[in-house]
Image: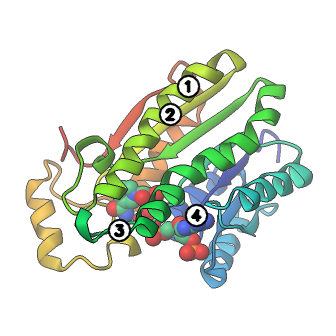
Amino acid sequence: MPNSRIVLITGASRGIGRAIALRFAAEGDTVVVNYRANHAAAEDTLQRCRLTSPESIAYAADVSDPAEAAQLVQAVLNRFGRIDVLVNNAGISLQKQVQDTTDADWQKVVNVNLGAAFYVTKAALPAMIARKSGKIVNISSMWGLTGASCEAAYSAAKAGLIGWTKALAKEVGPSGIHVNCVAPGLIDTEMNANLSDADKCAVIDETPLCRIGTPQDVADAVLFFSSPQASFITGEVLRVDGGLTV
Ligand code: NAP
């Protein structure tokens, strides 16, 4: 398809990543659906993407492993020759008090939510810099802005992603690369399957827009950052949280 972009989305088998993949595919962009383990979900996302974007592919890689992250990027470059948009979305949550958080918990949460963005971006940057073009969108969280009780490791990793976004935007802006960040509030995905209806109602009560978010709400923000309408925006953090953290 003319003007079709190559869009690599980490953690796109389910939830927010899936919605982002479907949103770009609906634009006719070619999507790479990365995932870690859930082949069935990734295949379902891929088949739905291919309805509007037949060249799209799925690729299994644990992006918290530097070697697998590099292999993922190399596979995309071998197949398509470029990456126009990179969405660092893969993430995991952890609800534990600090004194119950093991060293292994800490390392895993920081490595998946923050390290993976570094590994994938580091591998993708040389090709973007060579073309003097690229959009990178990192998926942080409102907890990276405000901190969440019993989610200190997750909050730290997501805050790190915001600092990293701002620093990288300065570093690669002169190379024509935009780096921005979306900070979602509570979004209706499997990540929140542990929340009761009462928990969700409590959040809704606190939210000026009186609902929890959908994966599509986040996908729309990512599409905006990747669009020509955001051509003078970099290093920015866009909250998609219904006003909860205002
Ligand atoms: P989700 O429904 O649990 O889906 C997580 C996705 O990440 C899946 O596609 C999973 O792949 C993938 N993934 C996890 N670890 C991975 C790894 N090491 N390598 C590659 N892929 C990996 O989560 P979600 O709610 O859509 O969250 C997406 C992002 O938004 C995360 O960064 C999360 O922190 C952030 N976020 C979510 C919310 C929320 O309320 N849901 C709010 C703020 C921010 P498999 O299917 O193979 O396991």
> Which sits earlier in the primary sequence, circle 3 or circle 4?
4
Lower sequence index among marks 1 and 4: 4
- Give the image location of residue 142, x and y in percent: 30, 47
Quadrant of the rendering where the C terminus is positioned:
top left
How is this picture coloured? rainbow
Residue under the image location 12 percent in, 69 percent down: 201
Instruction: Kindly identify which numbered label has been placed on residue 11.
Output: 4
Are discs 3 and 4 less than 8 Å apart at CB? no
Sooner in the amino-acid sequence: mark 4 or mark 2: 4
The span from disc 1 to disc 4 (Cα, nearest Å) is 22 Å
Amino acid found under the numbered disc labelled 2 = Thr
Disc 2 and disc 3: Cα gap in Å? 22 Å
Q: What residue would you read off at disc 3? A: 94
Q: Which sits in the foreground, 8 or 23?
A: 8
- Determine the residue positioned at 68% across, 49% down: 120
Circles 2 and 3: CB atoms closer than 8 Å: no
Cα distance between the residues tagged 4 and 2: 18 Å
